[in-house]
Image (tube, rainbow, N blue to C red):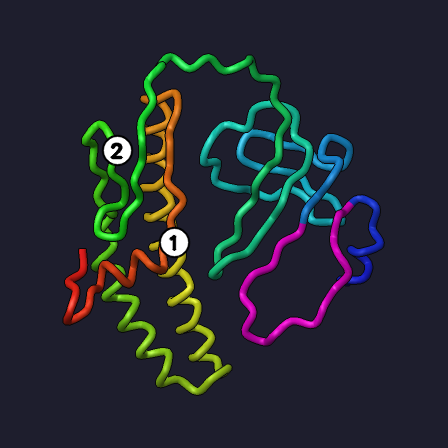
Amino acid sequence: AAWKRCFDKKLAAKAPVWKRKNEGRDSIRFVNFEKYCRLENRRVKLPSGLGWVKFRQSQRVNGKIKNATISQLAGQWYISFQVEVETAEPNHTSTTIVGLDAGVTKLATLSDGTVYQPVNSFKASQRKLATLQRQLSRKVKFSSNWQKQKRKVQRLHSHIANIRRDYLHKVTSEISKNHAMIVIEHLKVSNMSKSAKGTAEQHGR
């Protein structure tokens, strides 16, 4: 089946490769969307005998759909659409310039005094993750129970990553909307982490 998808002109599937038994991510892309697929409200018609598939729409799909990608991550299935949209030349309403200092104890500090603290709303999830990982370590590797437990760990990892990503999107959107130019210093985060921890001779920040 994998080789059939590889040679199917309707699909953009790559040649199959050997996968590890515990690998948990798969995806397939459908090109020439307007020719082979169709979108109606919250369902999409896919080729190769898949037919109509319902999905939960996170936002309205606007523009000309070029292709669709179905992916599986941590036991969850997702569909994304690549669209072509004509947009007017953006005109920024702000004229201010601001400097941004990225840190470890503080996410970002702006030259105008604005401080963005790191997100900490997922601390409870991190404690739960530690518990799930301990439970996973006690399972027989590659057993049915191990696979189930691993999916729980993957789902929680995905949940924590989504919280971080959402917070970063909100912060960066706020900064970019309020300032026309942002100046950022090139930093080595690894060195910053070392200095944040500190030593007996030199305290961290």
* Neighbourhood count class around disc 2 (C-alpha, 10 Å): few under 14, some 14–19, many 20 upward: some
Say whether residue 128 is left or right of residue 181: left
**Looking at the image, residue 177 lies above or below residue 105:** above
Tag 2: amino acid: Leu
Say whether residue 177 is left or right of residue 198: right
Q: Element type at marker 1? A: loop
Q: Which quarter of the rendering shows the N terminus?
A: bottom right
Q: Main secondary structure of the magenta part?
A: loop
Task: Residue under label 2, please give it.
Answer: 110
34 drawn magenta: no
* Residue shown at 24% from the left, 38% from the top: 109
Q: Position of residue 204 (x, y in %)?
A: 18, 60
As drawn, the label of residue 188 is 1
* Residue shown at 70% from the left, 43% from the top: 30
Q: Position of residue 120 (x, y in %)?
A: 22, 51
Q: Nearer the viewer, residue 205 or 83?
A: 205
Nearer the viewer's eye, disc 1 or disc 2? 1
Mark 1 or mark 2: whose residue is earlier in sequence? 2
Which image quadrant is residue 184 in? top left
Q: Bounds of the magenta span?
A: 11-28
Which image quadrant is residue 185 in? top left
Q: Element type at marker 2? A: strand
Measure how far apart labels 1 and 2 are at the Cα level. 18 Å
* Neighbourhood count class around disc 1 (C-alpha, 10 Å): few under 14, some 14–19, many 20 upward: few
